Image (tube, rainbow, N blue to C red):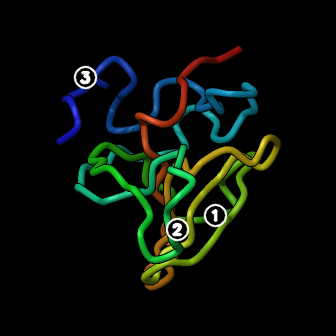
Amino acid sequence: MTEEADFSEQITDGKNKSNVRCQFCNCLMLKAQEGTYNQEEVDVPLMTQKQDRTADSLNSEPLKDFWLVKDMMTFENIGFSNTVDGRKFLVCADCERGPVGYHDLSTRHCYLALKRVVHKDT
């Protein structure tokens, strides 16, 4: 189980208080007030995988804090990766690191994991 993180300082009126950026290259992914806070536990592949894994055995971790983005065009900069079980994984469009969340193909909603990004305006 993952350790609990407190993201309350990042949330204002249910939205992201500040810009959301890639933790590796500082690329702007989502502007402030564009994502809606959503809690739902979902297994998301780890950003670093062991070399001896197979395609069917991705190492993952349960994440529960996400920014819900209902329209993918809301993002400033996001990339889409592999599709697994009805989900496309979200990656930074600049450095291609991730996954930082997922895109649900059935609802067409995107979920950006708060734990996988940084929140800052500059």
Tag 1 residue? 72
Between discs 1 and 3, the one toward the N terminus: 3
For this orientation, the residue located farthest to the right is 94
- Snapshot quadrant of residue 80: bottom right
Mark 1 belongs to which amino acid? Met
Mark 3 belongs to which amino acid? Asp
Q: Which residue: 40% across, 56% down? A: 59
Mark carried by residue 103: 2
- Snapshot quadrant of residue 71: bottom right
Say which quadrant the N terminus sits in.
Answer: top left
**Is residue 24 left or right of 71 when viewed as pictured?**
right
Tag 3 residue? 6
Question: How far across and how far down the image is residue 51, in percent?
Answer: 57, 53
Q: Give the CA distance from mark 1 to mark 3.
A: 26 Å
Question: How far across and how far down the image is residue 112, in percent?
Answer: 49, 49
Q: Give the CA distance from mark 1 to mark 2.
A: 9 Å
Between discs 1 and 2, the one toward the N terminus: 1
Q: Nearer the viewer, residue 81 or 57?
A: 57
Q: Which residue: 72% across, 58% down? A: 79
